[in-house]
Amino acid sequence: MNAIKRRLTAYLFRAVTLISLLHAASGSFAATPENAQTPKTIRVVMDDNYPPYVLKDDQGQLKGITIDQWRLWEKKTGIRVEVRGMDWGEAQRRMQAGEFDVIDTIFRNEKRDTIYDFTKPYARLDVPLFFHEDISGIRGPEDLKGFLVAAKTGDNSIDILKKHGVTTIAEYPSYEKLIEAARDGKAKVFTVDRPPALYFLNKMGIQNRFRETAPLYSGEFHRAVLKGNSELLAKIEKGFAEITPAEYRAIDKNWMGATLYSAPYLRYIGYGAGVIAIFLAGLLTWLRMLKRAVSNKTREISKSEERLSLALNASKSGIWDWDVVTGRVYFDSNYFTLSGYEPNDFPHSYEEWAKRVHPDDMVRAKNAIEAYLSGNVGTYEVEFRFKCKDDSWMWILSQGKIFERDEQGNPVRFTGMHTDITERKRAGEERLHFEQQLLHAQKLESLGVLAGGIAHDFNNILTSIIGNAELALMRMKPESPGINNLHRIEQAASRAADLAKQMLAYSGKGKFVVENLDMNCLLEEMLHILEVSISKKAELRLNTTPNLPLHGGSR
């Protein structure tokens, strides 16, 4: 019995010793430098709104090509991956603050090269400009002057736009919010990476409302770590290198779909080729006919445009087209030429137009627009002064009509023309002046006729008075009483006759006689007339200077 106990004790001792040795060995293995540098978990942050690479499902969970690749990387390396998705601007801020180990779905540029170390690119993506179908003439960033361009906060495209001199940029937190703004008419021009742009445009059913340019630039997706963390970067690249091309293709196919193709129908290719050949022959004939018709129509349109241009030039008119929602206004070349401006001298907007309307006319012009757009009046027509480039003012007749409304009936597009009526206005302030001068001349003529008639009748009366006074004087002796009164009557009547002659001369029925007068004698002759004209309470005294020189007068 004791022997058995001793053996059991020995076995237990050996077992404990073996376990201790194994534990020590495992501890030594875990403490090797290689294993000490292998993280158990890495934290990855990325954009949460970049389909098909990453997007959220109905429960808010991340899914997409990039998510599936990271899950496969997790299996290949045995390292747990915590993936977080958020608005792109916030993702970059929190990565730089050290909250995450890796940032994904990031383009590489000069600025970011100072912050991150990057993996090799794993996807190449085009980034075009998108613009509303009502807008034309946008080929690239050089054509964006005066436009408000929408972009995603933190996106590489913002730096690209600024390098091309585009400064009017509206930022949105995600591509989805940006495309929603485009759907609602708040963003007419925007730049979005092509894959998510097509996804959201089609999802919202507005893909036919917008056009796209050639790529503004092409970017590449990378994964990146903060500058200097080369060991983690190497582990990330090593893990993704273990994913086979077939596995990558399977993920892409899962999210992008496969080309429609059925091998069993290969035998029908020959029949199809014949049908296609016949179809192509007919199509070629139809295309030739269409080309000829288009060519003829193009010539007609060209002639119509030429006639319109000639008509506008002849009538001194220009065309404007106002987007009421955005405030953007299109002015044709005639609009600028009439006022001496070049097409790019000021931005095409309602505000810039308003700055050039004469302050005294602005209220009337604004009220006319508001009254028409609100439906209070049936037509839009207003005259106002517009400031030319040389600071002179021209008179404008502005007329227009609403050509487009939204679903609620609100005005969206307001189009019309303005006409230079400066000469007509000037000819009307001149016609008025001429009419006033003519009326004045007619009044003077009527007054002359009246004065002539009165003077003629008055002169006849005075002739009778003078004649009778002379007869009376001839019958009276010099010492007869009252003879002085008769002399005064004769003198006064003579002076009145002279006045009548002047009135006749003024009316064109007489003439002036210029002769020298003795002013003292003239005053003495007029003294008795003045005495009967003034108040009896007033005393009239005549103080003359003798031997005055004679003065020119008229009779």
Image (cartoon, rainbow, N blue to C red):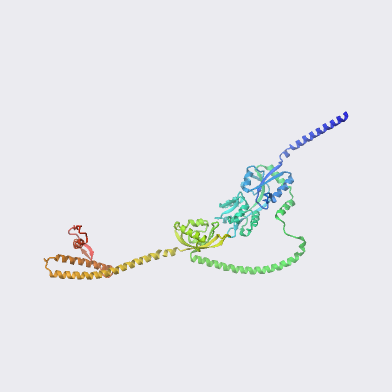
Q: Nearer the viewer, residue 79 or 533?
A: 533
Q: Nearer the viewer, residue 473 or 168?
A: 473
Residue at horizontal 63 percent and vertical 42 percent from the top: 97
Taking 397 as reference, is 40 left or right? Answer: right
- Image quarter of residue 131: bottom right
Residue lying furthest top: 2
Percent position of residue 463, x then y? 21, 70
Percent position of residue 468, x then y? 17, 70
Residue at horizontal 61 percent and vertical 53 percent from the top: 178
Q: Is residue 431 visible?
A: yes
Q: Is residue 109 visible?
A: no
Taking 103 as reference, is 495 left or right? Answer: left
Residue 345 drawn above or below residue 452: above
Residue 293 drawn above or below residue 85: below
Looking at the rendered image, the quarter that the C terminus falls into is: bottom left
Looking at the rendered image, the quarter that the N terminus falls into is: top right
Percent position of residue 257, x then y? 71, 56
Percent position of residue 482, x then y? 14, 65
| Numbered label tally | 0
Residue at horizontal 38 percent and vertical 64 percent from the top: 433
